[in-house]
C-alpha cells in the first residue's frame, strides 16, 4: 500500500490542488479539474507535476507546472520587461537625437551627440536582458518538454 501523502514518481510530498480549473486550463487534463469539483479535491506533486485523486490514484503524470518552471517563467518575464524598458529608452533617445539633428530648430552638436550616445549606452543593458530572457525561455522550454515526456529533472 502506498502512502497517499507522497508522490509515487518522485517521493515528494503532495499538496491539495487549489483552483483546479485555473491551473489545468489550456491543458488536456482540464476535465480532471472539472470532475474534481464534484468528486473531491485533487492532490498535486509540485516537484514533478503529477496529479492524484484524494485516495492516492495517479490521474496524470506531468500535468501541472512545477515550482521550478513557475519560478523560471517569472524570471523570464522579468527579464523580458527589463529588455523592453531599455529598448524603449534606446528608441526614445535616438528619436530625440534625430529630432535635434534634423528638426527645424538648431541644436548644438554636443547635445545631439549626448542624446545619441545615451541611446547607444542603453543598448548594452538591452542586449544583456534580451540574452537572459532568451536563455530562460530555452531552459523553460526544455523543462516543460521533459515534464510532458515523463522525465523527472532535478530541481534547482
Image (cartoon, rainbow, N blue to C red):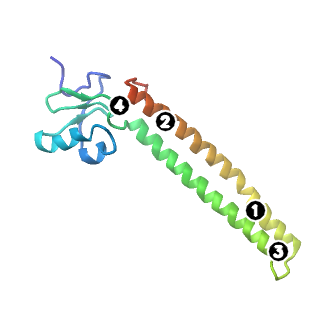
Sequence-wise, which precedes: disc 1 or disc 3?
A: 3
User: Earlier along the polypeptide chain: callout 4 or callout 1?
Assistant: 4
- Tell which of 16 and 104 is nearer to you: 104
Instruction: Give the labeled residue for mark 1.
Output: 118
Distance between the alpha carbons at the discs numbered 4 and 2? 17 Å
> Which residue reaches farthest top?
1
Mark 1 neighbour density, 10 Å: few (under 14) some (14–19) many (20 or more): some
C-alpha gap between disc 4 and disc 1 = 45 Å
- Cα–Cα span, label 1 and label 3: 18 Å
| Residue at the image position 60 percent from the left and 59 percent from the top | 85
Residue at 38% in and 30% down: 148
Q: For label 4, count other residues whose C-alpha is less than 10 Å away and answer few (under 14), some (14-19) or many (20+).
A: many
How far separated are the C-alphas under marks 1 and 2? 35 Å
Of mark 1 and mark 2, the one earlier in the sequence is: 1
The residue singled out by tag 2 in the image is: 141
Residue 93, given in percent of the width and then of the height, sits at: 72, 66
Would you name the residue on which mark 4 appears?
A: 47
Left or right: where 130 falls relative to 151:
right
- Judged from the image, the secondary structure of the residue bearing numbered disc 1 is helix
Which residue ends up furthest to the left in the rendered image?
39
Q: Secondary structure at mark 2?
A: helix
Rendering quarter of residue 109: bottom right
Q: Name which of mark 4 and mark 2 comes first in the sequence.
A: 4
Residue neighbourhood size for the residue with mark 3, other residues' Cα within 10 Å, grouped as few (<14), some (14–19), many (≥20): few
Amino acid at each position: 500500500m502506498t502512502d497517499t501523502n507522497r508522490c509515487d514518481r518522485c517521493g515528494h510530498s503532495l499538496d491539495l490542488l487549489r483552483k483546479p480549473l485555473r491551473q489545468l486550463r489550456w491543458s488536456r487534463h482540464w476535465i480532471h479539474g472539472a470532475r474534481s469539483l464534484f468528486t473531491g479535491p485533487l492532490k498535486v506533486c509540485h516537484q514533478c507535476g503529477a496529479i492524484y485523486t484524494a485516495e492516492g490514484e495517479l490521474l496524470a503524470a506531468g500535468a501541472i507546472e512545477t515550482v521550478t518552471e513557475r519560478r523560471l517563467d517569472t524570471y523570464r518575464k522579468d527579464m523580458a520587461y527589463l529588455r523592453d524598458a531599455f529598448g524603449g529608452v534606446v528608441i526614445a533617445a535616438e528619436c530625440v537625437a534625430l529630432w535635434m539633428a534634423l528638426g527645424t530648430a538648431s541644436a548644438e552638436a554636443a547635445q545631439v551627440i549626448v542624446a545619441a550616445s545615451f541611446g547607444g549606452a542603453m543598448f548594452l543593458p538591452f542586449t544583456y536582458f534580451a540574452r537572459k530572457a532568451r536563455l530562460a525561455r530555452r531552459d523553460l522550454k526544455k523543462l516543460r518538454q521533459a515534464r510532458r515526456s515523463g522525465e523527472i529533472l532535478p530541481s534547482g
